[in-house]
């Protein structure tokens, strides 16, 4: 596990988008915020050349990604799962073997905070890797469940921060091609 407390760097990170699906997101507290911030993270990952992986939870029942994210995630590795801990899914494990060997940090966005985000973060830690939870790009059906899950993850020493913190850490400096590519999305 990365215990050095370094800033996020694209070469060492992977954005993991967990289950922002149509039938689930209609019930999620502040779903619009989750979708908006997940979009920003996807744009940032692309601008800095960072790996992206995605999951759906029982797609047959919960449907495809919400339209606002479906287009952006098209072509990215995606696994359908029934496990709440994405790391326990064989298709996810296979996707992760294709990541660059330097990747040791997973930036998490999606739903639900107290179920799939929490259990996946635990699975990431158990694999000796680092979860970085984007607090305003995740949520649950009930706000209190999301709050309690965030408290639990913080108490376990997991990194938790807002979307803009993650984005600006990944961009590192102004004036670069990646920064300029992100400007329209940062307004």
Image (spheres, rainbow, N blue to C red):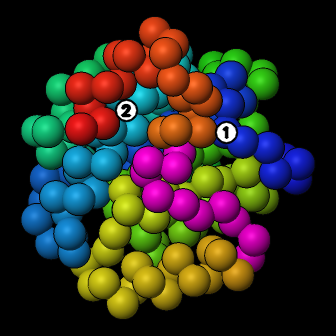
**Front one among 142 and 44:** 44
Q: Residues within 10 Å of mark 1 (few under 14, many from 20)?
A: many
Percent x, y for residue 14? 58, 34
Percent x, y for residue 110? 36, 55
Q: Left or right of 130: which side holds 141? A: left
Circle 2 sits on which residue? Answer: 42
Q: Name the residue: 65% across, 54% down.
A: 131
**Front one among 16 and 6:** 6
Magenta highlight on residue 162: yes
**In what element is the residue under mark 1?**
loop
Image mark count: 2
Q: Name the residue: 81% across, 51% down.
A: 5
Percent x, y for residue 158? 69, 65
**In what element is the residue under mark 2?**
helix
Circle 1 sits on which residue? Answer: 8
Give the mark, 1 or 2, whose residue is nearer the N terminus. Answer: 1
Disc 1 and disc 2: Cα gap in Å? 15 Å
Q: Left or right of 42: which side holds 130? A: right
Res. 162 visible in picture:
yes
Res. 14 visible in picture:
no
Q: Left or right of 178: which side holds 102? A: right
Rendered position, 103 above or below 149: above
Percent x, y for residue 166? 53, 45
Q: Left or right of 140: which side holds 91? A: right
Rendered position, 51 above or below 136: above
- The magenta region covers 156-166
């Amino acid at each position: 596990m990365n215990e050095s407390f370094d800033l996020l760097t694209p070469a060492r990170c992977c954005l993991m988008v967990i289950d922002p699906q149509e039938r689930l997101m209609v019930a999620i507290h502040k779903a619009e915020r989750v979708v908006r911030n997940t979009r920003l993270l996807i744009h940032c990952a692309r601008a800095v050349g960072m790996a992206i992986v995605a999951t759906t939870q029982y797609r047959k029942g919960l449907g495809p990604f919400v339209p606002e994210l479906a287009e952006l995630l098209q072509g990215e590795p995606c696994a359908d799962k029934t496990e709440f801990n994405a790391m326990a899914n064989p298709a996810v494990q296979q996707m992760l073997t294709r990541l660059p060997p330097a990747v040791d940090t997973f930036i998490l966005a999606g739903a639900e905070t107290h179920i799939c985000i929490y259990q996946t973060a635990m699975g990431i830690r158990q694999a000796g890797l680092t979860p970085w939870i984007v607090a305003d790009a995740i949520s649950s059906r009930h706000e209190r469940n999301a709050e309690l899950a965030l408290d639990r993850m913080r108490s376990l020493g997991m990194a938790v921060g807002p979307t803009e913190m993650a984005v600006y850490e990944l961009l590192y400096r102004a004036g670069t091609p990646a920064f300029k590519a992100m400007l329209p999305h940062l307004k």
